[in-house]
Amino acid sequence: MSSNQAPLKLAATLADKILSDCTGLDDYKRKLVTYWALSTHALNSLETFPILSLQGQFGCGKSECLNVINLLSAKSIRITLNSFTLPAVRDAFINAHEGTVLIEEADTTWKTEHDKAFENLLNNRGNRSASVEEHNHLVGKHWERQRAKYFGATALHRRQPFDDSALESRTIIVKFRAVHTRTYKPYNSTDPLTTEVTKAVGQIKKLQLPYFESIANVAGRVMDTYRPCLMLAQYLDDQAFITGSHDILHTQTESMCMDQGTEFTHVVYSALISCMIDPNDQIGRAHV
């Protein structure tokens, strides 16, 4: 057994218990969150990494889940969009290169023109080749233009999907709903179980995961989004999680294909309407 397998398995088992106590997530979603967080320890050997979006209304366990992700993740820092400007978010990403940024209140209250810039930052952060930013850096008494890398993992909680459908398709979305028929235990950073997880995570050495081959009839983008979690499941020999992922990935593929078809149809209809309104519209004719 690899030296990393024992602490990873222990951390995953204990974290599942904490998530079960603190949230209403089912078995598969708890493992998905856990494997996403633990696979951040392999970031230095990966070229892409998906966003994790915790979606749901108030009081359904998103913040508690983020606490557990913080416990499991590599080099994690925590920010909130309520108090961070766009440049501050960029700087946090740079400081967490090959690490994890956890974003609370990610339904931004910024002006609309900044929403797109934020989503671009998120999109690029998950791609090593695209996550390079030029910014001003104070050297002595003078500002110099420097290039900085900000590749890494990002987990956030929000109540609405992203505006950018491409970004949404590169995101693992975990939906929460309040279950009022049971009582939840609040996350406790001093609980003995939490302490044991911290010890297990501290024993994880430099992690390199074996590549997970694509599943038949699953779109490449969907496969790339879930691959780090599946790589970790394969490393830990969790066949039940891998098998359970097949149907989910196939459903994601079908949904993505339908969305792409809808988008294409919308473009065609718009061009046709444009031609009907203005017969001299050459742009609309070019689309048709």
Image (cartoon, rainbow, N blue to C red):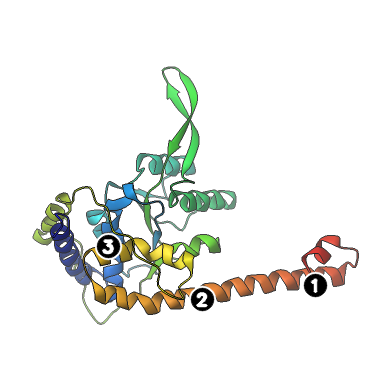
Q: Residues within 10 Å of mark 3 (few under 14, many from 20)?
A: many
119 w.r.t. 227: above or below: above
Is residue 279 visible to us here?
yes
Q: Could you tell me the amino acid type at mark 1? A: Leu
Which residue is labeled 1 in the image?
A: 272
Disc 2 vs disc 3: which is toward the camera? Answer: 3
What residue is shown with label 2? 255
Q: Amino acid at mark 2?
A: Ser
For the point 63% across and 74% down, which residue is it? 262
Image quarter of the N terminus: bottom left
Between the residue at mark 1 and the residue at mark 3, the CA separation in whole angstroms equals: 48 Å
> Front-most of 240 and 183?
240
Residue at 30%, 68% in the rendered image: 32
Classify 10 Å Cα crowding around label 2: few (below 14), some (14-19), many (20 and above): few
Q: Are marks 2 and 3 in contact (CB under 8 Å)?
A: no
Q: Is residue 187 left or right of residue 36?
A: left
